[in-house]
Amino acid sequence: MKTPTSIRTTAAAAALGLTVTALLTACGGPAAQSTAKPQADTAAAGGATGRGARTTYPAQVPNCGRTVRVERAPQRIVSFFPSNTELLLELGLEGRIAGRTWTDQSPPKPAYADASARVKVLAPGEISREALLSARPDFILADGEYQFDGKKLPTIAELAKLGVSVYIDSAFCPDTTGTATLDATTTDLASLGALLDVSAPAAEAIADVGKRLAAVDTALKGRPATSAAMVQIVDKQLYALAGGLYSDIVRRAGGIDVLGEDVPKGSNFAPLSVEALAKRNPDVLVYHYTGDADRSASERWLKEHLGATKAVRTHRLVAVPAADFSELRAVDGTLALAKALHPDAF
C-alpha cells in the first residue's frame, strides 16, 4: 500500500498504475476479518491465547480465509508497513525483526522512533524478490495480499514451501475490506501473540486498546455526530476513503462518513470527483499524507479545489499520516480524529 499510501489494495494499484498499491488502506486489500481465536495446532497440547501462556508449537491461526502455521517461534520477521513494524515493537520483538519495507509511507510514531531506526530498512517502498529472500525471513507481516502475485514477489503458497509464513493485516484481507472494523487490531494482536510466542504483551496491548477506545466512547457519549469525509490525493486525483475500517474509525470518532455511498460495496476506496465531494459538503475533511511534502501539496490542492466547502471555509482540514489507520495506529488515529471532530470533548 504505497507511494501515496492509504489505498492499499491490488485493485488500487491497478487503478493507479502504481508498482505497488498500499494506498488507500488502508494501505490494504479487503479485510477478511476473522473473529476466530488463535489455536495451537491440533497436534500440539495447549495454546497461547491466555495472558502469560506460552505457545506450544506447531501453532496455527486463521487469517484471510487461510491457515497460517508456524513450526517454531519465528526469528526473522519482515514487516511490510510502518504500522506493522510498530505493532511488532510493541510486542517486544525488536530483536526478531529482520527488516522493514514501505518506510516512505509515514514517519514512525515518536514512541517507536528509536527502536524503528535500529531495524534494517530493506526497501523504502516496494521490495524486490531478491531483497526479500536475501533477508532470509521465516515470517512476514504484510498489509495486504496484493504484493504476493508470483511475479514481483513469490505467492504466499510459494513462500510457505520455502518455510516462510505470511500473516496479513485482518483489516485488509481480500474478502472483507468493505466490512472491517477496529476489531481487526485485537484480532491481529491475539493471533500474532500466539504465533510469535508473545501472548502476555499481546494481552496487555489488547487491554490497552479496549481502555483507550472506551475512553473515546465515554467522552463522546450523547454528542451529535459531525459529518466528515476521508480522502487522499494521488497524482492530482482525489480518492474517497470510506467503507470498512475507514468508516468504522469515523463512526467511533463521533462522525458520520458522508462518502459511504461513493465507494463500491466491498471496497474501501474509489476515485472521487471534486463536484461529488463539494456536494457532500462535510464539516470536517480528513486527508492522508505520506510525508511533509505530500502533506503540504495535498493541503494546497484541497484549498484550491474545495475552497467553497464548509470544512475549508472553517479551517477544519485534518492531516493524518497514511499509516495511522491500521493496526495499533488505527486506535491512535481514532483518538486523534475524535479530538478533531469534537475538540471540546477532550
Image (cartoon, rainbow, N blue to C red):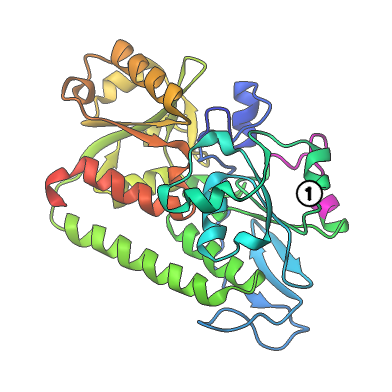
Q: Is residue 334 above or below residue 195?
A: above
Characterize the local packing of mark 1: few (<14), some (14-19) or many (20 or more) Cα atoms within 10 angstroms.
Answer: some
Residue 276 is situated, as x and y percent measured from the top left of the image, at 35, 20
| Residue carrying label 1 | 135
Circle 1 SS class: loop
Read off the magenta span. Answer: 146-159
Q: Nearer the viewer, residue 52 or 248?
A: 52
Quadrant assignment for the N terminus: top right
Q: Is residue 206 above or below residue 51?
A: above
Task: Kindly identify the residue that appears in the image at 52 percent across and 16 percent down.
Answer: 235
User: From where the camera sits, is residue 17 visible?
Assistant: yes
Q: Is residue 157 above or below residue 287?
A: below
Residue 125 is situated, as x and y percent measured from the top left of the image, at 64, 33
Residue that lies at the very extreme toward the top in this rendered image: 304
Q: Nearer the viewer, residue 239 or 83?
A: 83
Task: Kindly identify the residue that appears in the image at 58 percent across and 84 percent down.
Answer: 53
- Image side of residue 149 versus residue 265, left or right: right
Q: Is residue 266 above or below residue 68?
A: above
